[in-house]
Image: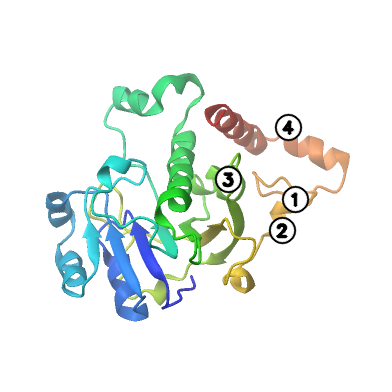
Amino acid sequence: MYINPAWRILTIGDGDLSFSYSLLKHYQPAALTATIFDDYASLADKYSEDHYQHLLAQGCDVLTSFDVTNSQTWEGLNKHQFDVVIFQFPLLPAFNSVEEFNQQCGNKLKSVSLNTLHRRLLRDYLLNCFNEFLDQKGAQIALITSKDVKPYRQWNIEQALTLKTNINYIGSMPFEIEMFPGYKIRNVDRDKHVKDTQGITYAFSRKITTELDALLLKPEYLKAHYCGACRVGPLHSEQDKLNHIASKRHQQMQIFEQQWLEDIK
């Protein structure tokens, strides 16, 4: 992940705040605001308040009980003041019951899965980044770091999230946790350190060109003769395509894609 010290940065859902603290300590951005989904009591109980206090002591704003999908939780946030917004390893909390899951699904229960709900979260994040958080005169970059393994790769981050928007997927770069000493990827529900298995940072912007362009990659599987959703190819012949379409892998992804298309109608 590339960090420009001149950026004004907003971090979203930063678990124990260790990413934000490492970002501040090692890159010293022009401005930093950190947010966490938990309230202060939960932060102190599950992790520690050390990073919270260190960030405050160095002049950073830290917002607790912050839900990126709910504007009513954004009190204290200076809108349209950021160059870059970063969401590290997003994951919904576990549901405690079928009823809780059904409530989250809303009125589209029959065509909704956990895959759909995670896509909703990330789409809402991107829309709010560009409509509410990012300065239109700034760098205008939104970053999502996720794991390149199932089920995360089945969210189809590169292609699905920006459908019916004017937001562009501009490429990706490897996430190397060694660049952020002290950062621990936390399980969303417990005080445990989660492996950063094959972390990839995906970049989005409304700009046609950005300062990240020379650093970003676009994988082969997004080109013609590939199945981008399944990350399979090249499919050189019609028989290759038919064989892939008949595969269990593709059939499962087709279910996810159809659910998603119905969800964003």
Question: What's the colour scheme?
Answer: rainbow
Decide which of tag 3 and tag 1 comes sooner along the chain.
3
Helix, strand or loop at mark 2: helix
- Mark 4 and mark 2: Cα distance apart in space: 22 Å
Q: Are marks 4 and 2 in contact (CB under 8 Å)?
A: no
Decide which of tag 3 and tag 4 comes sooner along the chain.
3
Query: Residue 132, percent across and down?
Result: 41, 50
Of residue 107 and residue 168, the one placed in the foreground of this image is: 168
Mark 4 crowdedness (10 Å alpha carbons): few <14, some 14-19, many ≥20: few
- Mark 1 and mark 4: Cα distance apart in space: 14 Å
Q: Nearer the viewer, mark 3 or mark 4?
A: 3
Q: Nearer the viewer, mark 2 or mark 3?
A: 3
Q: Are marks 3 and 4 in contact (CB under 8 Å)?
A: no
Residue that numbered label 4 is attached to: 246
Decide which of tag 2 and tag 1 comes sooner along the chain.
2
**Amino acid type of the residue tagged 2 in the rendering:** Glu
Dot label at residue 99: none
In percent of the image, x 60 and y 72: which residue is there?
215
Give the residue at the far right of this rendering. 237
Of residue 191 and residue 55, the one placed in the foreground of this image is: 55
- Mark 3 and mark 1: Cα distance apart in space: 23 Å
Residue that numbered label 1 is attached to: 233
Residue that numbered label 3 is attached to: 162
- Mark 2 and mark 3: Cα distance apart in space: 19 Å
Q: Nearer the viewer, mark 1 or mark 4?
A: 1
Q: Nearer the viewer, mark 4 or mark 2?
A: 2
Query: Residue 167, percent across and down?
Result: 57, 50
Drawn side of residue 30 relative to residue 239, left or right: left
**Amino acid type of the residue tagged 1 in the rendering:** Gly
User: Hey, which quadrant is residue 180 in on the image?
Assistant: bottom left
**Amino acid type of the residue tagged 3 in the rendering:** Thr
